[in-house]
Amino acid sequence: PQRPDSGLYADAGDVDGDGDLDLVVGGYSHWQSPARKLTKAQQQRVAELRKGVAEQEQKLQKLDDAVQEAVQGLEQEAMLKKYAEVWQAQKDERAAIQKVLAPLQQELDELVPVAKRESFVWFYQNLAKAAGKPAARK
C-alpha cells in the first residue's frame, strides 16, 4: 500500500529531530491482488479448499450457536459470566479447528486473492530543510 485510504489518524511532530514538522499517519489500506489464471489442478484444489474451509467454519458456527444458546435470556452479569465459562470450555476445540482452518484459508487466499484491509503507519518526512528551502508556514 502506498497510502492510507480510510480510518486516518494524523499527527505532526519533529520525528527526525531536524527542527521542522513531519507527519505520521495511521490508517487502513484496502487492496485486492489481480485474479490468477488457474490450471485445472489448481481449480480442483480451490474446490477442495473451499469445502474444507466451509466445514471448519460450520464447526465454529456450531460453537458460536452453543454460546448464544447458553447466554440467551440471562441478565447482563450472569450472561457475561456464562459467556466466559462456555467460551473457556470450548477453547481447546476452537484452537483445534483454527489449526486446521488457518492453513486451508492461507492456501486458498494464495490461489484466489481476496480483498484485504490492514492497518499501517506512514511517515511523511518534511524535506524542505534538507533541500535548503525554509519549511512552509501557514
Image (tube, helix red, strand yellow):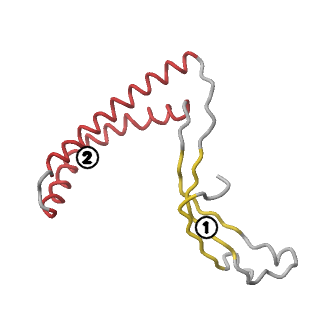
Which label lies toward us, 2 or 1? 1
Residue ID for mark 2: 91
Coordinates of residue 9 in the picture (x, y in percent)? 55, 68
Q: Residue 25, labelled with which disc?
A: 1
Coordinates of residue 103 in the picture (x, y in percent)? 44, 35
Circles 2, 1 touching at the beta carbon (< 8 Å): no
Q: Residue at x 78, y 80 (%)?
A: 136
Question: Relative to 86, is 42 on the left or the right?
Answer: right
Please determine whether, in this image, residue 57 is positioned above or below residue 137: above
- State the image quarter where residue 3 is shown: bottom right
Instruction: For label 1, count other residues whose C-alpha is less than 10 Å away and answer few (under 14), some (14-19) or many (20+).
Output: some
- Which amino acid lies under the numbered mark 2 shown in the image of this protein? Lys
Q: Tag count in the figure?
A: 2
Coordinates of residue 33 in the picture (x, y in percent)? 61, 39
Coordinates of residue 127 in the picture (x, y in percent)? 79, 72
Question: Relative to 116, is 75 on the left or the right?
Answer: left
- Which amino acid lies under the numbered mark 1 shown in the image of this protein? Val
Q: Which comes before the other along the chain, label 2 or label 1? A: 1
Please, what secondary structure does the residue beneath circle 2 have?
helix
